[in-house]
């Protein structure tokens, strides 16, 4: 298959799959999700992604209908049905199905999976960012399906001709971007927001921190402001599909681009790790 869809045991071409209207995703966005890259038929960091899915589900009292091991086995079974092994693997669990009502329904949760071709691009040019107020709720650490504020922020960035929108809370504290974490380098130190309820604890973020450890780059997990972002030596965004991207402009003005040696070392380390962990066995 070129693009695959899975819903509670049903498998088909993604464009032909349907979902019942009574699924709680349709009424409330009531669910959690994960997405990760796959190369040569090998998922990158599958344990970390699956663990985070189960943690998000637990915080919302959603009972995942399979075990962690069963989910990983299912994902690899579906990957084996694809025409290519370089993929974006997306999966979500919704609370279940039933007539629209705010109280939790009885019955099992629903499991969705989609697979589509995607290759990690190791050569991403510097990008432009904008900033905007963070209007999301105070459970950003849960990878929930409720993404309307993020959708609106990303559309604002798109219309401004920018790659991402950096979000900030009252007082100017930077949280994250519409669909990425964001970090800065200042005076040789990698600075990233702490993993509290205001940001998603990104998998790529964790791998960047680990890469800093291997490279001897000091790390500080501490809040920083929009002003500090704009005056940083480097600005880096990270996500599972684009794990180390360098920014060159913020709100229409030049920013970052002062410590290329550190960015290039991090970028090289992250790409090499991805290629190493997804290397096809001889």
Image (cartoon, rainbow, N blue to C red):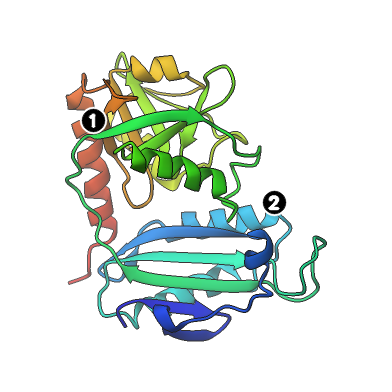
Q: Name the quarter where the N terminus is drawn.
A: bottom left
Horizontal side of 152 relative to 82 (left or right) equals right
> Can residue 180 be seen in this snapshot?
no
Question: Mark 2 sits on what residue?
Answer: 59
> Residue 20's spot in the image, x, y percent?
62, 79
Which of the pair 28/177 is nearer the observer? Answer: 28
When the figure is inspected, residue 153 is found, relative to residue 115, above or below; the finding is above
Residue furthest front as drawn: 159
Query: Do labels 1 and 2 touch, CB within 8 Å?
Result: no
Q: Is residue 150 above or below residue 8?
A: above
**Residue on which disc 1 sits:** 263
**Residue drawn 63% across the image and 65% down it:** 25
Q: Residue 32: horizontal and vertical position, in percent? A: 59, 58
94 vs 273, nearest the viewer: 94
Element at label 1: helix
Q: Please provide percent x and percent y for residue 130.
A: 37, 30
Write the residue at 52% across / 19% down. Answer: 172
State which quadrant residue 233 falls in.
Answer: top left
Q: Quadrant of the C terminus?
A: bottom left
Tell me: 183 left or right of 196: left
Q: Residues within 10 Å of mark 2 (few under 14, many from 20)?
A: few
């Amino acid at each position: 298959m070129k693009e695959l869809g899975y819903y509670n045991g049903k498998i088909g071409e993604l464009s032909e799959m349907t979902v019942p209207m009574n699924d709680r995703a349709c009424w409330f966005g009531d669910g959690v999700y994960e997405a990760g890259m796959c190369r040569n038929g090998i998922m990158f960091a599958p344990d970390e992604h699956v663990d985070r899915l189960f943690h998000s589900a637990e915080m919302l009292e959603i009972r995942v209908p399979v075990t962690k091991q069963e989910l990983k086995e299912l994902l690899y079974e579906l990957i084996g049905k694809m025409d290519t092994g370089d993929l974006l693997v997306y999966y979500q669990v919704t609370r279940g199905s039933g007539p629209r009502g705010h109280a939790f329904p009885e019955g099992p949760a629903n499991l969705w999976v989609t697979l589509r071709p995607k290759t990690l691009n190791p050569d991403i040019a510097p990008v432009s960012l904008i900033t905007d107020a963070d209007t999301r709720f105070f459970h950003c650490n849960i990878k929930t399906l409720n993404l309307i504020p993020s959708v609106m922020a990303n559309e604002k960035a798109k219309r401004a001709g920018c790659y991402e929108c950096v979000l900030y809370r009252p007082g100017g504290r930077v949280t994250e971007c519409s669909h990425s974490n964001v970090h800065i380098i200042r005076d040789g130190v990698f600075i990233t927001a702490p993993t509290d309820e205001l940001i998603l604890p990104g998998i790529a973020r964790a791998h960047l921190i680990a890469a800093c450890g291997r490279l001897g780059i000091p790390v500080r997990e501490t809040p920083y402001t929009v002003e500090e972002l704009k005056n940083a030596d480097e600005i880096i965004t990270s996500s599972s599909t684009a794990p180390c991207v360098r920014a060159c402009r913020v709100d229409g003005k030049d920013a970052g681009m002062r410590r290329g040696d550190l960015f290039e070392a991090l970028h090289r380390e992250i790409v090499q790790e991805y290629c190493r962990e997804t290397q096809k066995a001889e």
